[in-house]
Image: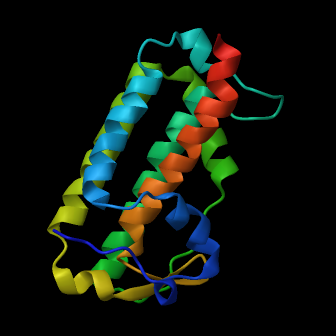
Amino acid sequence: MGLRRPLPGEFAEGYAHYLGAAPEGDVLAHLEDQLAEVGALVIGLSEIQGLYRYAPGKWSLKDLLQHLSDVERIFTYRCLRIGRGDATPIEGFEEDDYAHAAQADIHSLGGLLADFRLAREGSLALFRSLPAAAWNHAGITNGRHITARCFPYLVLGHAAHHLDVIRERYLPGLK
C-alpha cells in the first residue's frame, strides 16, 4: 500500500507523542509485528500476574491490555469516519472511565489477548481497504485537527508506548 508517514501539518501537536513513538518503515507490517509482540509479552503469564499493578492506583496488566483494545477500536473508528469524509467533530473519551467500566480483571488474559488480536485485525482490514484519496481527508477529534493518514501511526505508537510501560514497570515486578 505504501502509506507515507504523516507530515506535521496533518495533525495537532497533541498527537506528536504517539506519532513519534511509531517506528519508521511500513506501518502495516509494523502493526502486524506488534500483534505478535503483544502476544509474546502476555503468553505464559498467570492470571495472578495479570492482576499485577506496579503501584497503588495504577491499572492492572489486564486493565492495560483492555485499554490497548479499547483505544485501538476508538482510533480505527475515527479513521473510518474521517477516511469516509465525515467532517463532524469527534469527541474525546475518558480512558479511566473506560478502564473502570470494562472490569478487565474479571476476564482471562487469554480472552483479553484474543480481543486485542480481533481489534488489531479489524484495524488492519480497514487500513488496507481505504482508497488512496481517503488518507488525505481531515477531521477533528478531541478538539484537534488530524488527517486519516495519522491513525495507523497513532495505533502503532500508542501500543508501542504501552508496551514499553509493560516492559519497564510491569514485567520487572512479575519476576
Q: Residue 80, how many percent across, how many down? A: 31, 71
Split into 4 quadrants, where in the image is the C terminus? top right
Figure check: 44 above or below 13? above
Residue 100 falls in image quadrant: top right
* Identity of the residue drawn at 18% across and 81% down: 132
Figure check: 10 above or below 123? below
Closer-to-camera residue (102/135): 135
Q: Residue 75, how many percent across, how many down? A: 44, 63
Closer-to-camera residue (144/159): 159
* Identity of the residue drawn at 25% across and 47% down: 121
Q: Residue 15, how many percent across, how many down? A: 58, 71
* Identity of the residue drawn at 41% across and 18% down: 43
Split into 4 quadrants, where in the image is the N terminus? bottom left
Residue 115 visible: no
Closer-to-camera residue (57/93): 57
The image's colour scheme reads rainbow
* Identity of the residue drawn at 50% across and 90% down: 9
Count of all numbered marks drawn on residues in the image: 0
